[in-house]
Image (tube, helix red, strand yellow):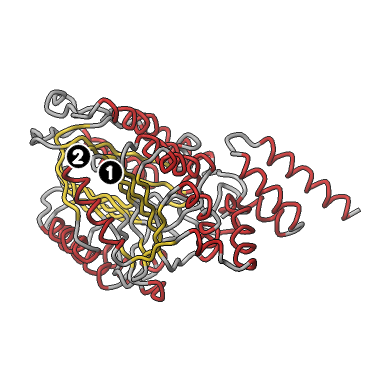
Amino acid sequence: MLIALHLLVQLGLLVRVLLRPNRDPASRIAWAVVVMVLPVAGILSYLLLGETNVGKGRRQRLQQVVAGLPDVTAAAGMETATRPVIPDHRESLFDVGRSISSYAPLGGNQGELMADSNATIDRMVEDIDAATDHVHLLFYIWLPDRNGTRMAEAVMRAASRGVTCRVMVDDLGSRSLIKSGLWTQMGQAGVRLGRALQIGNPLLRVLTGRIDLRNHRKITVIDNRITYCGSQNCADPEFLVKARYAPWVDATIRLTGPVVRQNQHLFATDWMTESGEDIGHLLTEPLAVPKPGFAAQVIASGPTAYPAAAPEMFASLMFNARRELIVTTPYYVPVDSLQAALRAAANRGVDTTIIFPARNDAFAVKAASQSYYEDLLRAGVRIFEYKPGLLHAKTVTVDGEITLIGSANMDRRSFDLNYENNILLCDPAMTKAVRDRQVSYLADSRQITQDMVLNWSWRTRLWNNALAVVGPVL
């Protein structure tokens, strides 16, 4: 009787896997294998983690918030000053970005690539100390370490002089901060605190949505004038929670101009969804007249965006490349279309380079990533592995003209499960700065050749390929 019931449950889940909308074939196969090969664990895994469900209540709140916020697809009254200058053959990239999160490209932006992680925190603290109206911070990981404490102290100083400070962190990624005295001190100092995607009771949480859907964004907005975008968490590069892989090597751009308003809108959607406080008025404040600058656009993705949004953006960049494509990403577990786009770039003669960390804190992702090496190398993609630490930068440069930078990795978690934020920009000078940083990584990297991959043992190949089969589950 129990065996028959178990088989019936397995069959029901297999039918569910096959009928579930918006799931690519590789994901269906992976979950079918897990459910069949692991009779008990597979069933439990699918029930807990098999479907991208943020919960009906949360989805409705988010939709209501977005519907009620002012439209920032263009800067009212500033259309001429913010009109972006984009070459005709690049406009389609910004069309893809707009289809994902409705933000239009805006001109008149300026940017500065931060030197390193500590320099990023230094500059953020400096900007917070100069804030006069508000400070908005959202981080996936905020640690109560040296840099995390410096940021918290800067926010508390701002709050003490009457600046409205709102701080949001992911409830899982920043659990060590939330449990620390520093979190309590910020609240007592008048900082308004928010916890994204609160877990609560794990046993009850799974009834209202997947527990591992996380807010992976890194957003800083100060006085509607300054924003930051990149891979930087609020932590030391030594990253003591995973010190054996340190230092974490990040890339972050400090931006001013009309694109700040789009990051403000994105922060507002998350803050209002989680806290209920209406801050929509900040999106209607007059903008300063923009200075001459480059075109930029916020691209936000997540489990409530349309399926395949993030990989579509990455693949579009790869197909748009004519001469050169350079990618850095710490985690690579692609959908088939993304792997094909990388190969296609190299096959049509584009100088295509991708840089991974040599040591990865996610062993399963590392193995799955390596299973794709041979396919890429055969197409002519140059693969490098960065040796000094965990290369955490998420960057793409195209032909020395286009840059995508932000929080999104090229893996299934970023594609399907995480809320992410990126900025797409068109500017030779800004792109040169990012490209120069990418090239600097190569000096500390080893190149992976086809001979090296072909000489891997059968055990390594078996391990890598086995984990790649369940890559969509990872």
Task: Judge left or right: residue 237 versus residue 157.
Answer: right
Q: Residue furthest front?
A: 451
At a point 72% along the width and 52% down the height, the residue shown is: 35
**Residue sitting at x 41%, y 43%:** 346
Query: Disc 2 vs disc 1: Cβ atoms closer than 8 Å?
Result: yes
Instruction: Check the image and report above or below for 317 versus 159.
Output: above
Seen as rendered, the residue at the extreme right is 1
Residue at left 17%, top 26%? 83
Per the image, label 2 sits on a secondary structure element best described as loop
Residue 427 circle label: 2
Tell me which amino acid carries mark 1.
Thr
124, 406: nearer the viewer: 406
Measure how far apart labels 2 and 1 are at the Cα level.
8 Å
Of the residues shown, which amino acid type is indicated by label 2? Asp
Tell me residue 356's x, y (percent).
40, 59
Question: Measured from the top left, where is residue 166 in percent x and y?
Answer: 26, 52
Answer whether residue 440 is visible to the viewer in this image.
Answer: yes
* Residue 423 left/right relative to 260: right
Q: How many marks?
A: 2
User: Residue 108 lies in what quarter of the image?
Assistant: top left
**Figure check: 413 above or below 142:** above
Q: Which residue is mark 1?
A: 403
Query: How crowded is the residue under tag 1: few (<14 C-alpha within 10 Å), some, or many (20+)?
Result: many
Q: Looking at the picture, how far across and down is residue 450, in whole percent?
A: 49, 58
